[in-house]
Amino acid sequence: MFREITADAELEAMERHCLEHRGHYGLRMGYVLHNARRGRVPTARFYADLGDVTAGRFAAAAHGAGTTEPGSSPTSAASPKSGGESAACTMIIMVHPTADEDTIALDATTPEAARVLIHEHLTNFTLLGIAHPSNPQRPRRSITFSGFDDAHFTENIRQVFPQESGFVLKYHPCKMYSATNPALFAPELYLPKLQAGWTLGPLRAEDAPMVNQLWPYSSPGTLGFIADLITTYPSMCLFVDGTPACWCLTQNYGAMGMLHTKDEFKRQGLGKIVMMALSQHLHSKNHVPFLYVVHPNTASHGLFKSLNFPQEDRDQSWLLVHPPKDQ
């Protein structure tokens, strides 16, 4: 049965299976569940059909096994694969309003879960305080669909928000890099590179306005979001004589991100040092270091390839749905 999950024992079971899977969705969901259970993401809500989780079959489902064809029922479980491997559709959906209260981030473990979210819940708006184009009496808010690799995802969204509705869809395809081998970021690889006056440490709360100003996706309301990331999740900064020169944050879903080097400190290898240091810190906390890079960011792709971080073959994409400007 698909329902909201609130009991800590069930959330713990979901976290355990996510982290054991360690795939694209497993890493993301496992991290969010880990922090939600510790009160760090109080706005997160989780919805699932726990039948396959309790049966120990979450890993196969979270990997995207048993996809349904377009037009078929998204809630029906696929028949078992040969050899007894489950291809059932376990569904976990996270509803997580960001700090500025203008965007609701939605996540799901499988393409099937995405279709359930879109067609059964988003269409009826039973989970969200946003308005369907046909119901202008309810408030409109932007929505972020994060990290999906379902080829039919955009098509499904467009069925809910057709072009004539005035809603704007922005698509951002990314590549995912992850590093399960700690030898890739061992301290002896980066600590000797620190020069006189260079120190490593977390970002401070007072650094949030600077980080927000230099973030390419900064907009009204993102300062609170960035301040929350800095004070709640791991970050790493390389300080030059006490001044922040290069930094990287951890997103609320576990991915490293927002890597930035100030112009006057570029081409000195600071980005590599910061990424290895943050990766090592996350690994010491039993989290797998991973991140997403948008396709046009060739510099970041080159950086992580030079660090030998493995890259997933399939794109993981972000889809932003913005309400009409006149609303």
Image (cartoon, rainbow, N blue to C red):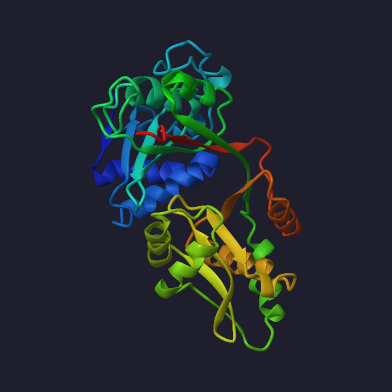
In the image, taking residue 62 as reference, residue 5 lies left or right, namely: left
Please tell me how many numbered marks the rendered image carries: 0
Name the residue nearer the viewer: 194 or 59: 194
- Residue in the image at 63% along x and 54% along y: 179
Can residue 83 be seen in the rendering of this structure? yes
- The quarter of the displayed image where residue 196 is located: bottom right
In the image, taking residue 273 as reference, residue 23 lies left or right, namely: left
Can residue 89 be seen in the rendering of this structure? no
Locate residue 235, reporting x and y percent. 50, 66
> Does residue 177 sit above or below 126 in this rendering?
below
Locate residue 14, reporting x and y percent. 37, 41
Quadrant for the N terminus, please: top left
> Does residue 182 sit above or below 7 in this rendering?
below
> Does residue 297 sit above or below 125 in this rendering?
below
In the image, taking residue 53 as reference, residue 215 lies left or right, namely: right
- Residue in the image at 46% along x and 65% along y: 234
Q: Residue furthest bottom?
A: 196
Name the residue nearer the viewer: 210 or 89: 210
